[in-house]
Amino acid sequence: MHNLIDIQNQVPIYTAKDFESDQEVRWCPGCGDYSILKSVQKILPQIGKSKEDTVFVSGIGCSSRFPYYIDTYGLHSIHGRAFSVATGLKISRPELDVWVITGDGDGLSIGGNHLIHTCRRNPNLNILLFNNEIYGLTKGQHSPTSSQGQVTKSSPLGNIDTPFNPLLLTLGAGASFVARTADRFPAHMQQTLLKAAKYKGCSFVEIYQNCNIFNDGAFETFTDKESKDQYSIFIEHGKPLRFGVNNEWSIVLKNMEPCIVATSEIQEGEEWIHNQENKNLALLIAQFAQNPLFPRPFGVLYSVERECYENLFAMTPKIVEEEKLDKLIAGKFNWIV
Amino acid sequence: MLQKEIESVIIKFAGDSGDGMQVSGSLFTSTTAIYGNDLSTFPDFPAEIRAPAGTVAGVSGFQIRFGSSLVHTPGDECDVLVAMNAAALKSNLSSVAPQGIIIANSSGFDSKNLRLAGYQADDLPLEQAEKMGFKVLNLDLSKVSKETLLGEKISTKELERGKNMVALGLVCWMFNRNLDQVLELTKQRFAKNPAWAEWNQRLVKAGWNFGETIELFHERYQVNAASLPSGKYRGVSGNEALALGLVAASHKAGLQLFLGAYPITPASDILHELAKLKHLGANTFMAEDEIAAITSAIGVSYGGNLGVTASSGPGIALKTEAIGLAVMLELPLVICNIQRGGPSTGMPTKTEQADLFQAIFGRNGECELIVVAPGTPKECFDIAFQAVKLSVEHMTPVMLLSDGYIANGAEPWKFPSMKNLAQITPPIAEAIPYKPYLRDGNLVRKWAFPGMKDMQHRIGGIEKEDITGNISYDPLNHHKMVYLRKEKVAKVAKSIPPQLILQGPQKGKILVIGWGSTKGAITSAVETAHKAGIEVSQIHIQYLHPFPENLGDILSSFEYILIPELNTGQLAFILKANFQIHPICFNKVQGKPFFAKEIFDKLIEINQNA
C-alpha cells in the first residue's frame, strides 16, 4: 500500500515495480518484448494515472500477451480487434488511460481496417505496434511487413507481397501522432512512449522488435552498435536531420526531394530542421524506408493537436429523468381506449 | 345509402414508390387507431431505392387490416386494393380476395403505364379483373387532384401527386372514418408547411366528397370499434419498440446504453431510432464494419456500461468470433439479429426465420448464450427489456431474434409506464481481493471494471482458471469451465416466465408451436379452428435458449404437434433433439410470412387424419 501521493494528479507515487503483475512472463528468452515491457513499466509512474484508471487492450499474437504482465486493468481480446474494443472503452469512459498493444500481423493484416479508422477518428489511445516482420505465435509465416523475397514457412520461394510501411499507412489514414522506436533503444523508447502517452489523441508508435526465433536480426542494421549510426537517423522536433558517427551526414530537401549531403558542405539556410507539425515533411521522412540508401528514421515524425474522438462522441450522462422516458415511450401520437 | 357492418377489412394502398402510399397508409392507420379498431400494418417497399417509375419493380405498398375484434396480422388477401397504376395492379392482383374491390386510378392505366408495367398494348387489365369477379372502380383520382388545386402555385408533378390524398379521402369515406379527425391528422402531418397542410386537407376532402357524389358505390362499410383493454395506446413498429426497450432497460439498470452498429437491412432502423435519442441516454456508434460494431460494444461493457449491437444474418456471421469473446469474458452484451432471407446476401428485404441454428449453435467451441425472440412488433419492447435484464443479471451475451416482418410491421401498443418496469441489478463486485471468476449461486461472476480500486485484473478470450481468471491450459480446468458456462446459461431457465398456453386446453389432441413473427398467423389460424370446432392448443416460445422449464411437460400433453416455421424446420429439429417428440413440420421459405389460412388448412388436414 502506498503512503506517498502525487498531489498534482491525486494518484499514488508509483515505481516501475508497482506495475508488475503476479503472472510469469512467458515470451521466448531473448525476445524484444521484454525490453518493451520494462520500458512501459518504467514510464507508467510518470503519467499521473492510477493503476485502476489504466487499461491495456490487446489483440492476438505474441505482443498481445502484454496486458497479463502489467498490474492494471487488461483485456486480451481477439485477433485484430483491440482497436475497436479500445475505442468503445475510451469513448464510454474518457477518463481512463487506454493503451492498445498490437503487432504487425494483428494490427496491419487482420486488424488493418480498424487501425486506419482509429487513426482517422483520433480517440485518445496509445497504440504500440510491435513490428517484428513475422508471425511469431503461429510460428513463422510472412507478415504484412515482411520484406519482399523473404523466405518464411509460408513463403518458401520468397515473399511476393510488397510490405506495408506502417508510418506511411497511418499518416495516410489521418493519424495525428506517428512515431517509431526500437526494442534495442530503451532510452529512446521510454522518451517516445512518454510523448505518446502525454499526447492528447491517438498516438501511433511503431516499435521495431526482434523475434530471435523466427526472424532474428531483422532490424540489426538499424539497431546494432556498429551500424546504427550509419543506417539510422534520430529525428527531433526543431533539430536538423543529421546522422553518422559524428553527425557527418545530413538530409536536406532539394526541389522537395530528400538528399543526403555531407554536413560540412551544407549551405546557409539549406538545413532541414524537423518540424513535427508538417505533414508533408513527415510523409517524406516516413518514405526514407522505401529507399535503401537512406537511414531509417526513429522518433516522432508527426504530432499535431486535433480534437479527440471521445470529446466529439460525448457519451451522455447516466441520469435521465423517468418522466422524459415516459414521454418518449408514449410517442408523438397516442390515443386513449 | 346502405351501411354494411363488417367485422374486419384489409386494405392495400399500392402505387409507384414516389406516389406517397406510405403517407396515405399511415394517416389511415392513425385515424383508424383513434376510431378504436384493433389493427395491424405492413409496409411493402421495393428493394431498389429508385426503381424506374411505373414498373413492377418500383411498386410500393402499405397494407392495413383493422377490425372490431382482435387483429393478429396485416392479413392474407386484401379486400380493397387501391392501385395507382398498372404496375401496382399487376404486382398485387394475385393477393386480392375473391370479389374484392379494386379502386384503380384510371390515368395510371394509359398506354405508357401499361407498357411500363409489362402489359401488351391491347391488354385491358381492368376489364380482365372485372371478368375475374373483382369489383373494379375505375376513377380518375389524378384529375380530382388537379382540379382541386387548380390555380395554386404548384408544379404539374405535385398536382398529379395529390392523388394519394384523394385516395385516402375516398377510402375514409368508404369505411366511415371521422372526416374531421382525418383532416386534423393531415394538418399535423404537414405541420411544417402550412400551405401544404391546407392543400392536402382539401385533397382529402375532395376524395371524401368524390365518394359521396359519384354513384358507383352502393354501400358504405362500418367496422365498429374493438373492445380493447382500456388505456393509452400508440402505434409502434418492431424496430421502434426494440429501440425503446433498450433505452428503458439500460435506464432501469443504471447503465449507459451504447449501440455499435453497421448499416444492414432490415436492422438499420434500430440505429436510426437510437441515434435520435442521444439526449435520452442512447449512444450510437456507426462502426467501420460489423466486427468493430460488436467489439466496440464489448469494450463498452468491459468499461461497466451496456454494449449492444444490432444486425441481420450476414452481419451476425461476421460478429461470431466476437460473440465467443463475450461468452468467455462473461460480460453483458445484447446482440439483435433482425433476420432476413438467407443464406449469404439472400433476400435482404424479405422475411425469414432461418437464423435460429446460427443463434443457438453458430460459434466455435462450446459457446452457449441466451436466445430470445419477440412474436409481434409490440413484443419487441418487452423482449428487448428482458434481453438486457437477463444479460446484465446473468453476465452473459443474449441474442435477440426479430425479423423483417415484425421489424417493419406495426400495431397498436398499450405502452407501459417506466415506474411499472422491473428493476435491473448488475452484479457489481464489492469484495476485495477480487476474484474475477468467482461465482454466485446462479454461477454468475461479479463485475469489476476499470476505475474500481484494487480490483485490477486481466481477462481475455483464452481459457482461464476457475475463480482467478488467470490463463490456464489445464485439461480438467477447461472441462470444468466449459460446464460452468453451460450450466450458467441453463440456470437462466429459473429466471424466465413459464411457457404459457395461449389458446386451447392444457392437454389434448393438437398443439401448435410457434416462435417469432409467425405468432399472428398462428393465433388467427387457431382462432378460426376453434370456430370450426377443432380442438387445438397454441404455444408461442419467446425463450428459445434455455427453454422454459415446463416446456417438456406441455409437449408431452398432446398427441400431435404442429410446428409452422419460415425455415426448413429449425425449431422442430431442436425440439426433437431435446424432447424426443415427432412433430409435424410445416415450412415456408418464400421470403413471405405465413397466411393464417395456410396454417388453418394444415390444422384441418391434421384433424381429419388424426
Image (cartoon, rainbow, N blue to C red):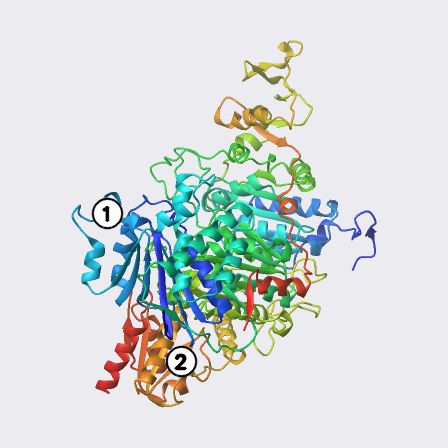
Q: Position of residue B456 (x, y in %)?
A: 67, 60
Q: Position of residue A229 (x, y in %)?
A: 60, 25
Find residue A175 and report its image quarter: top right
| Secondary element at tag 1 | helix
How would you rate the neighbour count of disc 1 (Cα within 10 Å): few for under 14, some for 14-19, many for 20 or more? many
Labels 1, 2: one chain = yes
Residues under numbered marks 1 and 2 in contact, where contact means CB atoms less than 8 Å apart: no
Apparent side of residue B459 relative to residue B110 in the rendered image (left or right): right
Q: CA distance from mark 1 to mark 2?
A: 47 Å
Number of the front mark, 1 or 2? 1
Q: Position of residue B150 (x, y in %)?
A: 43, 43
* Residue at far left of view: B122
Quickly name the residue at label 2.
B539
Q: Is residue B590 left or right of residue A63?
A: left
Of B511 and B201, nearer the camera is: B201
Q: Amino acid at mark 1?
A: Leu
Question: What residue is shown with label 1?
Answer: B114
Q: Residue at x 63, y 21 (%)?
A: A241
| Screen quadrant of the N terminus of chain B | bottom left
Q: The C terminus of chain B lies in which quarter of the figure?
A: bottom left
